[in-house]
Amino acid sequence: MNSMVNRQRGLSLSGLMFMAVILIFAAVGAMKLIPAYMQSAQVQNVFDAIVQDPEMQKASVRDVRMSYIKRASINDITAVKAEDIEVEKEANGISLSTSYTVKIPVAGNASLLLEFNIRSPK
């Protein structure tokens, strides 16, 4: 009988509850962070599309911003406004960049602050 007790292994109920609480907090945290990272990826995709568009290579800064507004409204991008975009004219085309922060409330007065720096490829 003693050898059988020494061989039994597993997770106790309190250990299971502790692990469940940790997993729930991790899942809730991920569900709050994912939308911010998805919107950042959408902004990057819009920047890439604008930079690769042949019509935008010779366009004015106003036209580039108007193109961003149209594309952002299609993708429902609200984190970055057209005024927040820095448009640089280069010899081989244009370059777009922006920096912004997203504040995500976690619980009570605790929140996460995410900083994004997005730049179009050269």
Image (cartoon, rainbow, N blue to C red):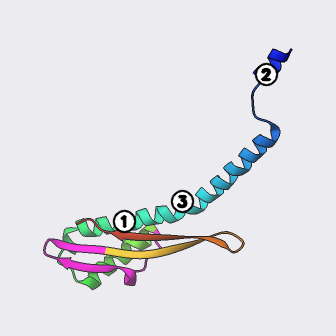
- Which residue does the image show at 79% across and 21% down from the upper left? 6
Residue placed most toward the observer, 110 or 77: 110
Image coords of residue 25 (percent x, y): 68, 55
10 up-or-down from 35: above or below: above
Instruction: Read off the magenta span.
Output: 76-96
Amino acid type, label 2: Asn
Secondary structure type for disc 2? helix
Residue 79 in view of the camera: no
Using the numbered discs, state the Cα–Cα distance from disc 1 to disc 3 in whole angstroms.
Answer: 15 Å
Q: Could you classify mark 1 by the number of other residues whose Cα lies within 10 Å: few (under 14), some (14-19), or many (20 or more)?
A: many
Residue that label 2 marks: 6
Amino acid type, label 3: Ile
Q: Is residue 94 left or right of residue 41?
A: left
Quarter of the image for residue 33 reads bottom right
Q: Is residue 8 left or right of residue 72?
A: right
- Which residue does the image show at 35% across and 67% down from the upper left? 46
Quarter of the image for residue 120 reads bottom left
Image coords of residue 20 (percent x, y): 73, 46
